[in-house]
């Protein structure tokens, strides 16, 4: 069994995290390591008022000789894998304790006590939501566990109503409780433990589960109403499973866990937009979390993953398509006519920048989304092109305009995008050769980089880097008609300078003004350290604890 990582293995697993992870049929995943969960529970334990610090069970106030008291170490969790991958074992770790009980019955009964040394009580918790009703979990707890509004998702839930004590079985079950107590005290000890579990299950005066009956931590948007434009949507369905940390192929089916199981992963399977939850669970592919190799290497306690359909296609490209709409030139009029018995000519060359609602009724302009060109070498490329031309060729004059555009997008944390809109106006008076031709061009070139980045207060931000916009003009005048297109050229140039394309940074920030925050209640904050795309095009946000150590 592998218990340490060498540098070569660490580098390989880090690469596979990008190249081999797969979200499957799910819309979102939140993955947290067993190490991180136990770190969070240890932090909650530090609260002096925490129910996790002491046990005090006295069923009968008048019977002062029948009790169980104990001081507790921080609780811990063990994520089961293999066939039990939807079960978690919650350990109540006893530092020291005393059991008071009666030996014998009636007037001959003798009050006795027994010291309990370092011990653990093991509770098996079923995390499969589709089995809750069958297990008799109260409806109000089911609702609490599956509360997914306001961009929040309950993370790591222990409902003691559904928890079963794993008794001491002398090694029959490797996850069992461990304690040393005499046989004569054992029956009373288990009775007192049942009383303790009833305390954990106790309801408040309103009939709802007590604060302590569900231990959880939450990944949620702070002030959710502020982040309604964030690149996520509230899950509408939720389920759980565990995944093993895989170093070699045989680890995929193992039930013990390499590296002492500390990096086994609890996975929150999430669907959005009322999409149906898949029946099949995830199979181990590559690791979503990374333990440290040494004191200087990076480690990730968790990952939030949004599918390609949810983020890249559903959010990012659809937002960037706004630039396609705003940078498309539409020709309104391009015509000429003779006046005054042919002694003079009237012509009109007009267009507008940006698709209007009326333009979108035209089949030519209905689809202004990015089209994939290729993927490989760590990049995905998308393109948008549109050409609109009106050509009046009924008489001696011909007038037309054309608009080519494009985008080059990198599938990494730095997304490069650019576009070119060129308006070409061409007039030609037939029959007099080259001196009857004149053309003008107005070209707007814009480019910028979008950077997905994390910041200290837990947000995922999309920032704009290296924005640049240039508008250039060119007038290829003839000898006879040197100034005939000056007004057209000036009008087009002004439209570009007054458009959102001229300040590409402000336009991007308007599109991506929201931030996505993940914070953990009752303990230390997770924050988004880095964000990138994996080979499947899914967005992976790497989570770290804000405070040092676990």
Image (cartoon, helix red, strand yellow):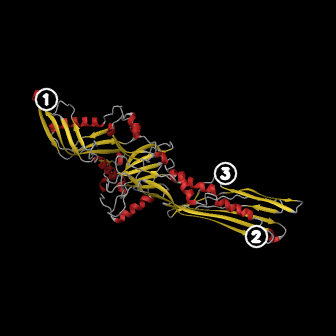
Given residues 208 and 243, the one toward you in this image is 208
Lateral position of residue 426 relative to residue 268, left or right: right
- Residue assigned mark 3: 356
Given residues 380 and 255, the one toward you in this image is 380
Q: Could you tell which of marks 1 and 2 lies nearer the N-terminus?
A: 1
Given residues 344 and 448, the one toward you in this image is 344
Cα separation between marks 1 and 2: 116 Å
- Position of the N terminus, as image quadrant, is bottom left
Q: Could you tell which of marks 3 and 2 lies nearer the N-terminus?
A: 3
- Position of the C terminus, as image quadrant, is bottom left
Please give the name of the residue rendered at 41% of the width and 37% of the height, measured from the top-left corner. Answer: 143
Please give the name of the residue rendered at 63% of the width and 58% of the height, measured from the top-left corner. Answer: 499
Is residue 234 placed above or below 65 in the rendered structure?
below
Q: Quadrant of residue 88?
A: top left
Cα separation between marks 1 and 3: 90 Å
Q: Residue furthest right?
A: 341
- Residue assigned mark 2: 477
Q: Position of residue 377 (x, y in %)?
A: 50, 64
- Residue assigned mark 1: 105
Q: Residue furthest left?
A: 108
Lateral position of residue 349 relative to residue 216, left or right: right
Q: Secondary structure at mark 1?
A: loop
The crowd level at tag 3 (other Cα within 10 Å; few <14, some 14-19, many 20+) is: few
Cα separation between marks 3 and 2: 32 Å
The crowd level at tag 2 (other Cα within 10 Å; few <14, some 14-19, many 20+) is: some
């Amino acid at each position: 069994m592998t218990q340490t990582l060498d540098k070569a293995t660490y580098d390989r697993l880090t690469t596979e995290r990008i190249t081999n992870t797969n979200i499957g049929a799910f819309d979102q995943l939140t993955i947290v390591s067993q190490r991180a969960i136990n770190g969070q529970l240890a932090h909650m334990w530090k609260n002096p008022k925490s129910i996790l610090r002491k046990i005090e069970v006295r069923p009968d106030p008048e019977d002062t000789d029948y009790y169980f008291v104990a001081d507790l170490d921080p609780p811990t969790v063990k994520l089961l894998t293999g066939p039990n991958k939807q079960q978690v074992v919650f350990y109540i770790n006893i530092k020291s304790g005393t059991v008071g009980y009666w030996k014998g019955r009636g007037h001959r009964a003798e009050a006795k006590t027994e010291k309990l040394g370092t011990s653990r009580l093991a509770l098996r918790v079923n995390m499969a939501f589709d089995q809750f009703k069958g297990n008799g979990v109260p409806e109000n707890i089911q609702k609490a566990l599956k509360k997914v509004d306001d961009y929040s998702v309950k993370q790591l839930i222990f409902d003691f109503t559904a928890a079963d004590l794993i008794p001491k079985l002398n090694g029959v079950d490797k996850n069992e409780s461990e304690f040393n107590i005499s046989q004569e005290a054992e029956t009373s000890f288990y009775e007192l433990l049942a009383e303790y579990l009833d305390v954990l299950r106790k309801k408040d005066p309103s009939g709802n589960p007590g604060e302590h009956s569900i231990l959880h931590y939450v990944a949620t948007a702070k002030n959710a109403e502020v982040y309604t434009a964030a690149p996520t949507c509230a899950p509408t369905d939720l389920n759980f499973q565990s995944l093993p940390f895989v170093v070699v192929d045989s680890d995929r089916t193992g039930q013990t866990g390499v590296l002492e199981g500390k990096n086994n992963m609890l996975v929150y399977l999430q669907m959005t937009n009322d999409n149906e939850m898949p029946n099949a669970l995830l199979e181990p592919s590559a690791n979503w979390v990374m333990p440290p190799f040494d004191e200087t290497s990076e480690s990730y306690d968790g990952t939030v993953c949004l599918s390609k359909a949810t983020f890249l296609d559903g959010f990012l490209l659809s937002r960037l398509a706004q630039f396609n709409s705003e940078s498309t030139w539409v020709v309104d009029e391009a015509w000429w006519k003779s006046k005054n018995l042919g002694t003079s000519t009237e012509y009109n060359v007009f267009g507008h920048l940006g698709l209007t609602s009326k333009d979108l009724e035209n089949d030519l302009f209905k689809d202004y989304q990015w089209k994939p060109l290729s993927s490989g070498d760590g990049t995905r490329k998308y393109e948008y092109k549109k050409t609109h031309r009106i050509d009046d060729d009924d008489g001696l004059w011909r007038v037309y305009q054309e608009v080519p555009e494009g985008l080059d997008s990198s599938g990494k944390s730095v997304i490069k995008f650019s576009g070119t809109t060129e308006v070409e106006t061409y007039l030609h008076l037939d029959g007099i050769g080259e001196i009857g031709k004149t053309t003008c061009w107005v070209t707007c070139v814009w480019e910028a980089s979008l950077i997905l980045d994390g910041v200290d207060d837990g947000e995922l931000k999309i920032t704009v880097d290296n924005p640049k916009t240039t508008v250039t003009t060119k007038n290829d005048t003839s000898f006879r008609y040197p100034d005939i297109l000056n007004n057209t050229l000036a009008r087009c140039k002004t439209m570009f300078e007054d458009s959102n394309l001229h300040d590409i940074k402000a336009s991007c920030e308007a599109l991506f003004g929201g931030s996505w925050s993940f914070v953990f209640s009752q303990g230390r904050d997770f924050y988004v350290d880095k964000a990138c795309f994996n080979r499947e095009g899914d967005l992976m946000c790497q989570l770290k604890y804000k405070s040092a150590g676990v």
